[in-house]
Amino acid sequence: MTPNPAVRREQSGSPLEEAYGFAHAVAAGDRVLVSGTLPVVDGEVRGEGSPYEQALLALRNALAALEPFGLGADSVVRTRLYLSHARDADDVGRAHAEVLGAVRPVSTMVVVAGFTDSRVLVQVEIEAFGGSREARDARGARGAREESETREEREDRGDPA
């Protein structure tokens, strides 16, 4: 199959992406879609037992997936929040407001039967609007230059997100 040059895919490094055949983030036209993102750092679930902490981390991980495209929180137009328990809605909503409240994307919160890892309480999907391809390409080039500094700074602080 010949790849579509108008579609750009980014991987996060999760072994599931290769095993299950998906990308973590895809830019197609003006949209960037981020697949279901978990509260995971270095392959380990974090914030076990805390839907608020898991939602913060999953949201930050999903936003980090926008960085290679030169996008950030201000570009987010839709979020989908998947919860394993309805009782966690307020905690997850509070985390969403903390991270994206100023942006106010459209959002859907859904309770699901569970996740493939029972320690996971929250999964997040994000859609972002990148503007024209030319503008996105320019931001992506700039973002790629800045990303190595950003990651190094985060690692120095011990912040994985």
Image: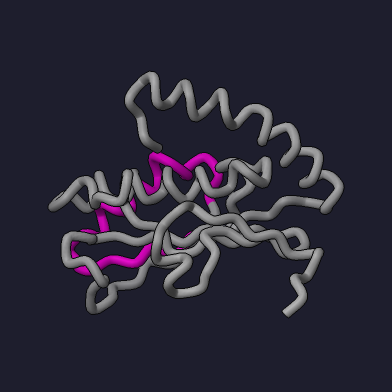
Compared across the picture, whether 101 is left or right of 128 comes to left
How far across and down, in percent of the image, does residue 115 sit?
26, 71
In the figure, residue 19 lies in which quadrant? Answer: bottom left
Q: How many marks?
A: 0
> Residue visible at 34% across and 67% down?
82
> 44 or 30: which is nearer to us?
44
How far across and down, in percent of the image, does residue 36 sit?
43, 64
> Residue visible at 17% across and 67% down?
118
Compared across the picture, whether 11 is left or right of 50 comes to right
Q: Is residue 52 above or below residue 107?
A: above
Asked if residue 98 is among those painted magenta in the image, a careful observer would answer: yes
Q: Is residue 94 above or below residue 119?
A: above
How far across and down, in percent of the image, does residue 49 sit?
13, 52
How far across and down, in percent of the image, does residue 87 sit?
17, 63
* Camera sees residue 131: yes
Q: How is the image coloured?
A: one colour
Residue at far left of view: 49
> 28 or 105: which is nearer to us?
28
Which corner quadrant holds the N terminus? bottom right
* Camera sees residue 52: no
Asked if residue 2 is among those painted magenta in the image, a careful observer would answer: no
> Residue visible at 30% across and 51% down?
43
Q: Which residues are magenta?
A: 79-104
> 63 or 1: which is nearer to us?
1
Compared across the picture, whether 153 is left or right of 95 comes to right
Which corner quadrant holds the C terminus? top left
